[in-house]
Image: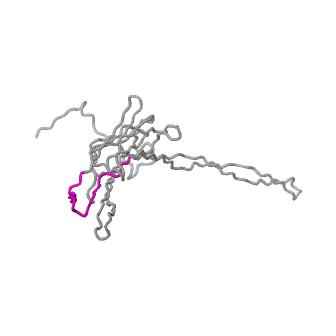
Amino acid sequence: MTEYADILDNLFKLKHNHHVLTNPSDSVDPGPHPVVWSNYKDWNIVETIWNAKYVIKERLHTDKDHYIRKFVYGIINASTTLNYTSIVWDTVKTMLNTTNTMGLSNSSKETNSTEETTFNVTHVPREIQVINSYRCSQASSEKPATAPFQCKKDFLLESGSKPFNFSTGDTLSFTIVAKIGGHLVMENREKKYNETHSLVGTTKTLQYVFRWDFVLPYHCIESAKTINDDCKEPLTVPELTENVSFEYI
């Protein structure tokens, strides 16, 4: 089986109260698809819905005298997977012991040593990931889907009952998978029994990505100490509305 299932349409809708953010629903090509950006952090639920179908182009013989007794085909696996990735900063304290040596007197050779404890504090990045998968019930190996069907799932944007704390750089991706396959039953006329053979199909995978950015835009000259090749002066032009002049040719 060399054909692929058809993803007819899809929609991923982030929601919170009256706020809504969606992906382009007509983007069913293989991709990669444009990233959808957000600077809103209170999303708490996402609605996912997509439709798929598979129609085989060439059917095998099914007459009663043919050695192929049964042919079962269709979409055998359909799923939606949410993947949330975020970077958190862990505070790491390292204990440092220092020894101070002090003399008792100018005429004495004896010294007195004391130890002082200090801490070095650093911040170390750590990636956290939350993966949540949903398998569409309409497709299975035992009963492949041969008619168009809809896969729908609402995901809560939380981990361990705590909402996602969206911050700059976070990524939320949705991957939809539609795999075709099946099996056929063949009559072994020499041994006089039926054999079942699995059909190896193909898998169509589409991915849609949301990302977060809360950093306000700024010109590099605001943070650069000196102007260099990578950071130019902002472009300025005369105010045309104050000094209007025309040149006729």
Q: Residue at x 38, y 51 (%)?
A: 230
Give the image location of residue 101, x and y in percent: 79, 55
Which residue is nearer to you in this view: 231 or 182? 182
Specify start and end residues of the magenta stretch as a single range: 55-80
Q: Quadrant of the N terminus?
A: bottom left
The image shows residue 52, relative to residue 21, as above or below, that is: below
Q: Quadrant of the C terminus?
A: top left
Give the image location of residue 36, x and y in percent: 35, 42
Give the image location of residue 165, x and y in percent: 49, 39
Give the image location of residue 199, x and y in percent: 31, 60
As for residue 72 lying within the magenta part, the answer is yes
Residue extending farthest to the bottom is 190
Residue extending farthest to the left is 249
User: Residue 21's quadrant in the figure?
Assistant: top left
The image shows residue 25, relative to residue 57, as above or below, that is: above
Number of marks in the rendered image: 0
Residue extending farthest to the top is 18
Which residue is nearer to you in this view: 78 or 117? 78
Residue extending farthest to the right is 107
Which residue is nearer to you in this view: 232 or 53? 53
Q: Is residue 89 left or right of residue 245?
A: right
Q: Residue at x 46, y 47 (%)?
A: 131
The image shows residue 44, relative to residue 173, as above or below, that is: above
Q: Tell me the colour scheme of the image.
A: one colour
